[in-house]
């Protein structure tokens, strides 16, 4: 939980992810269904880097299957104001990825969480009290958040933690914006991601741009707060500036001062402009 791998993408996505996993001791205990949550925030990726690239999820699934080919894997996303999940799965290559994996005999599918049955959870947090959330999420055996580094006008940054916002099933997700930090922290406490990956080859200023920053790196770790604290630092920020990272660290979701294995933060860091 308190160690994070920071690796350069020197040749292939798969090799970079494998190197990162080796630094942190591998996946840990895998159990089906494995849920993979990419950041698919919009149907219109204006920068080409605002949405998690499908080749990252493909490489991740291949590494998972090398560990246990009998795993059931679900790629999950909800509708939001800027997209319908099913349309986005198709546009960004996730449907094709699942078809290709099924042809190879693997159980990989997409799940539109906005169409998933809801279950009530006995939970009292900073925002939610006994929320109704998608059954698929609450019955996950292992959860992976795969995000991209972005600044955000509401949450300051988007990383592994903010990516969890996309499991909320209602399309008008702006309903939660006034309490976004509390919502993110509650979701992190409920889901407790087992693995977090930041595809930091290219970062984005703004949730959908317009400006991009080249970093050529991946961040991999088991603690969501640890991963996002490292992401913040390579973007030129301090975790103390970002409320949902600080609050998540109070709930055993990682630390704001993790041990960084592999590359140094200084060798990767690129100064981002803070969000407006």
Image (cartoon, helix red, strand yellow):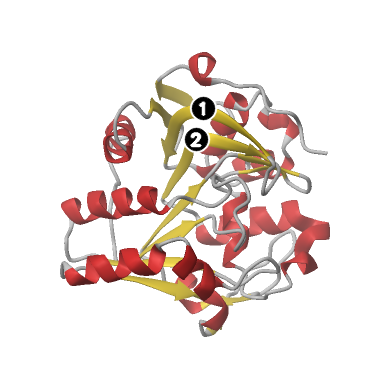
Rendered residue at 16%/61% (across/down)? 69
User: Can you say which quadrant of the picture contains the C terminus?
Assistant: top right
Dot 1 falls on a residue whose secondary structure is strand
Dot 2 falls on a residue whose secondary structure is strand
Can see residue 197?
Answer: yes
On screen, residue 17 versus residue 125, left or right, reads left
Find residue 93 and report its image quarter.
bottom left
Rendered residue at 45%/34% (across/down)? 219
Q: Position of residue 153 (x, y in %)?
A: 78, 45
Find residue 115 and report its image quarter.
bottom right
Rendered residue at 69%/61% (across/down)? 125
Are there few (<14), some (14-19), or many (20+) residues within 10 Å of tag 1? Answer: many
Disc 1 to disc 2: CB gap under 8 Å: yes
Label number found at residue 215: 1
Label number found at residue 200: 2
In the rendered image, the vertical position of residue 97 relative to residue 248, given as above or below: below
């Amino acid at each position: 939980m308190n160690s994070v791998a920071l690796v350069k993408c020197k040749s292939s996505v798969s090799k970079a992810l494998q190197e990162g996993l080796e630094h942190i001791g591998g996946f840990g205990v895998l159990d089906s269904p494995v849920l993979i949550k990419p950041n698919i925030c919009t149907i219109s990726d204006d920068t080409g880097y605002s949405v998690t690239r499908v080749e990252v999820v493909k490489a991740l699934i291949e590494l998972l299957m090398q560990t246990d080919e009998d795993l059931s894997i679900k790629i999950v996303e909800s509708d939001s104001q800027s997209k319908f999940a099913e349309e986005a799965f198709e546009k960004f290559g996730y449907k094709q990825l699942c078809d290709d994996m099924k042809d190879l005999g693997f159980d990989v599918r997409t799940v539109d969480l906005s169409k998933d049955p809801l279950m009530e959870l006995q939970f009292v947090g900073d925002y939610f009290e006994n929320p109704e959330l998608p059954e698929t999420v609450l019955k996950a055996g292992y959860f992976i958040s795969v995000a991209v580094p972005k600044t955000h006008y509401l949450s300051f940054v988007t990383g592994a933690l903010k990516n969890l916002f996309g499991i909320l099933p209602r399309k008008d997700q702006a309903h939660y914006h006034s309490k976004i930090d509390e919502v993110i922290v509650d979701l992190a406490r409920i889901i407790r991601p087992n693995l977090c990956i930041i595809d930091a080859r290219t970062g984005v200023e703004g949730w959908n741009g317009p400006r991009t920053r080249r970093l050529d790196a991946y961040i991999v770790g088991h603690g969501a707060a640890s991963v996002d604290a490292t992401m913040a630092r390579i973007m030129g920020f301090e975790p103390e500036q970002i409320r949902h990272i600080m609050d998540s660290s109070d709930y055993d979701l990682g630390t704001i001062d993790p041990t960084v294995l592999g590359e140094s933060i200084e060798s990767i860091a690129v100064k981002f402009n803070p969000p407006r």
